[in-house]
Amino acid sequence: MPKLTNKIALVTGGSRGIGAAIAKRLASEGATVAITYTKGAEAAAAVVGAIEAAGGKSLAIQADAADADAVTQAVEKTVATYGGLDILVNNAGTAIPKPFQEATIEELDRVIDINIRGTFIATLAALKHLRNGGRIISIGSCVGERNMTPGLAAYAATKGAVKMFTQGLAREVGDRAITVNNVQPGPIDTELNPAAGDWAAPQIANTALKRYGHVEEIAAMVAFVAGPEAAYITGANLTVDGGTNA
Ligand code: NDP
């Protein structure tokens, strides 16, 4: 039997990039998977279609991670539709790369609201429903621990916050056998961080493996952490970065 059979998951920002790969991978392991998105209704529908075509169950919900009510309702809708929640993946995130001295207050608020506040709110809503043995998995970043890239100071700070939130929360929910972990990608080829973009060359140079990672390489770690073999891993920052932080 697939290891996530009968598990219900919600992946924020699941319409493309890392989130879409996570949604498809969890579904391939037997989970029922809801995803959120903001603008990409067609892309979200395509992820749902791919999961259904493979025999799984999936649902796309429009919910901006910066909108507390929308995020809370997305959790509630997932629970109401499928009858529970076992796995929350806080994947929705954004970066606005530029020298910090040139950032606007609005840009700083946006990065904080999506990357930190959105993660807090989705987690708060999910904890009301997560069954014993549940999983909270956030997608932080290798720059949350060590940042060598000028232009990412504020973004890295938000991912550092995700790291400490993970460690602190793990100690509060362990009595429910809920694990809380932070998967920290290095450079992964997505629309947010294209391997062919201007920012790519220095990021590749910083890796030990001299390449960008693939979305499936992050999804594989998330699927492991979501599964029964990872029941004793909590409060951990699991870096999948091609050796960037080595
Ligand atoms: P992409 O921009 O490629 O995809 C982001 C996904 O999230 C899309 O499905 C997008 O759909 C959705 N999304 C964007 N903004 C919001 C929002 N406000 N609310 C809800 N959903 C939203 O990003 P990646 O896949 O590259 O990144 C995913 C996560 O991984 C982020 O947290 C990012 O910080 C992290 N990460 C990425 C790395 C990389 O190199 N790519 C490296 C380290 C960490 P829509 O447009 O419809 O909203």
Image (cartoon, rainbow, N blue to C red):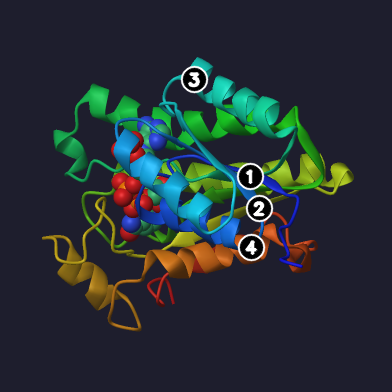
- Mark 4 vs ligand 1: CB below 8 Å: no
Relative placement, left or right, of 130 versus 18 is right
- Among the 4 quarters of the image, the one containing residue 111: top left
Mark-to-mark CA distance, 4 and 1: 11 Å
Q: Are marks 2 and 3 in contact (CB under 8 Å)?
A: no
Image quadrant of ligand 1 equals top left
Q: Can you see residue 93?
A: no
Q: Amino acid at mark 3?
A: Ala
In the image, is the residue at mark 1 within 8 Å of ligand 1 by its beta carbon?
Answer: no
Q: Which of the two residues, 70 or 138, is positioned nearer the viewer here? A: 70
Mark 3 to mark 1: distance in Å? 17 Å
Give the residue type at disc 2. Answer: Ala
Instruction: Please give the label number shown on residue 29.
Output: 4
User: What type is the residue that disc 1 sits on?
Assistant: Ala
Label 4 and label 3: CA atoms lie apart by: 28 Å
Q: Which mark is residue 87?
A: none
Question: Where residue 183 sits: x, y (%)?
Answer: 54, 58
The residue that label 1 is drawn on is 9
Which residue in the structure is indicated by mark 2? 31
Tell me how far mark 4 sits from mark 2, CA to CA.
6 Å
Tell me which label, 4 or 1, sits earlier in the chain: 1
Give me the C-alpha separation between circle 1 and circle 2: 7 Å
Number of the front mark, 2 or 3: 2
Callout 1: 10 Å neighbours few (<14), some, many (20+)? many
Nearest to N terminus: mark 2 or mark 3: 2
